[in-house]
Amino acid sequence: MKPIVRPELRFRRLWFTAGLAIAALIALVCLLPGSQLPQVGLSDKIKHAIAFAGLAFWFGSVIVRRDLVAVALAVVAFGGLIEIAQGLMGLGREAEWGDFVADALGAAAGLLLALSPLGQWARWLEQRLPVRAA
């Protein structure tokens, strides 16, 4: 059973595709050599938690509620795969359990946020966009 985007959303394909683009951006940033990344002034763990909270919040907001466990597992598995890739690439990045834990904690925080009224952002935004004439 594949997760489905909430049926009340008009731009389901757009929201899902944008989420995949966010995931690709996270993968790119996580896999670039650390020397090529700008210094932000936050700890590596905080950056991981924020990135994965954002990803989980995005998908948790647009995927039907019954599939939130699948979203959680997918986001955490994605973080694990990135850590494995960092360890195998040899480009100055290392696989760290701490990063994986930060990814998982961020994913949990993002899903909790998606369950709050803030998780209705896509529906709220769609209601404010003009309706296309049939």
Image (cartoon, rainbow, N blue to C red):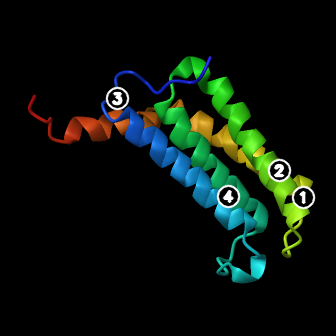
**Counting other residues with Cα less than 10 Å from the Cα at mark 2, is it few (<14), some (14-19), or many (20 or more)?**
many
Left or right relative to 56: residue 47: right
Q: Which of the marked residues, 3 or 1, is nearer the chain's N terminus? A: 3
Report the amino acid beneath label 4.
Ala
Give the residue number, with chain letter if any, for mark 4. 27
Marks 1 and 2, how far apart at CA: 7 Å
Q: Which residue is depicted at the point 58% across and 17% down?
A: 66
Marks 3 and 1, how far apart at CA: 38 Å
Q: Secondary structure at mark 1?
A: loop
Q: Which residue is depicted at the point 90% across and 61% down?
A: 87
Q: Quadrant of residue 111?
A: top right
Residue 121 in view (yes/no): no
Residue 9 shows which numbered tag?
Answer: 3
Give the number of the mark in front: 3 or 4.
4
Residue 96 shows which numbered tag?
Answer: 1
Report the amino acid beneath label 1.
Glu
Q: Which of the marked residues, 2 or 4, is nearer the chain's N terminus? A: 4
